[in-house]
Image (cartoon, helix red, strand yellow):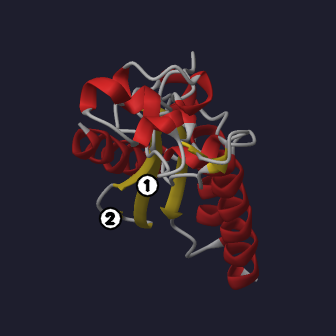
């Protein structure tokens, strides 16, 4: 029964992480460079993200921008060979930071946070006490209140979360592992 619950919880956490990491279409391209697209003039137009990040755009040997002196490249009369300007700011990359395992009398607690830039976008309990049916229920209450993209951790952006009634030890262990993860993220 515990294994089935852990498997379901793991599946739900994994699915949540994928949804958060994938985001809207194109959101995952912050970590990966998209392929260059062909321009109407037959050359290669650099991806828009390069222009916003200050990287040098690539030019094809067939475009006027690739020939001549550096000053001739800068004053090219062909607007199709110039990089496209974007108004979108560079997207923050997501990263995961895991807190230490914190022991209490009911079992171990370990928390992982997902950050987009400096903002916490998800919290996941990697380990919670599951020894008895009672500790299992209380762990579920702690996990439900604190974890996830809409849990108290994401809402408050800190380890200052409310103690779950009847699960004080697990709440405190969660808070300690969470605070360590936040400190490691800085």
| Left or right: 78 as drawn, with respect to 171 | right
Give the quarter of the figure containing the N terminus: bottom right
Upstream in the sequence, badge 1 or badge 2? 2
In which quadrant will I find the C terminus?
Answer: top left
How many residues crowd mark 1 within 10 Å: few (<14), some (14–19), many (20+)?
Answer: many
Q: Residue furthest front?
A: 68
Q: Judging from the image, what secondary structure is the residue with disc 2 in?
A: loop
Instruction: Check disc 1 and report the residue beneath it.
Output: 111
Q: Which residue is mark 2?
A: 101
Residue 164: % across, % down: 56, 38
Query: Around disc 2, counting alpha carbons within 10 Å, would you say few (fewer than 14), some (14 to 19), or many (20 or more)?
Result: some
Q: Quadrant of residue 157?
A: top left
Residue 166 x %, y %: 57, 44
Assign a secondary structure to mark 1.
strand
Q: Nearer the viewer, residue 46 or 80?
A: 80
Residue 26: x and y in percent read 68, 43
Whether the residues at callouts 1 and 2 have beta carbons within 8 Å, the answer is no
In the image, residue 48 above or below residue 42: above
Residue 57 relative to residue 78: left or right? left
**Residue drawn at x 38%, y 32% as measured from the top left:** 53
**Residue 141 seen anywhere in this rendered image of the structure:** no
Q: Which residue is found at the position 51% from the left and 52% from the top?
A: 33
Visible in this render: residue 69?
A: yes
Q: How many marks?
A: 2
Residue at image location 57% in from the left, 15% down from the top: 87
x, y (%) of residue 29?
58, 47
């Amino acid at each position: 029964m515990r294994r089935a619950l852990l498997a379901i919880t793991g599946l739900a956490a994994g699915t949540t992480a994928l949804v958060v990491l994938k985001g809207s279409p194109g959101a995952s391209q912050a970590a990966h460079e998209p392929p260059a697209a062909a321009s109407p003039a037959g050359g290669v137009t650099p991806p828009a993200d390069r222009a916003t990040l200050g990287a040098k755009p690539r030019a094809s040997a067939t475009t006027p921008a690739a020939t001549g002196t550096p000053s001739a490249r800068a004053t090219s009369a062909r607007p199709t060979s110039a990089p496209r300007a974007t108004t979108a700011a560079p997207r923050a990359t997501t990263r995961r930071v895991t807190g230490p395992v914190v022991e209490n009398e009911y079992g171990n607690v370990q928390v992982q946070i997902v950050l987009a830039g400096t903002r916490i976008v998800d919290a996941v309990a990697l380990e919670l006490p599951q020894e008895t049916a009672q500790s299992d229920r209380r762990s579920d209450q702690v996990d439900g209140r604190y974890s996830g993209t809409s849990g108290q951790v994401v809402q408050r952006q800190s380890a200052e979360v409310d103690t779950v009634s009847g699960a004080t030890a697990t709440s405190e262990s969660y808070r300690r592992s969470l605070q360590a993860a936040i400190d490691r993220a800085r």
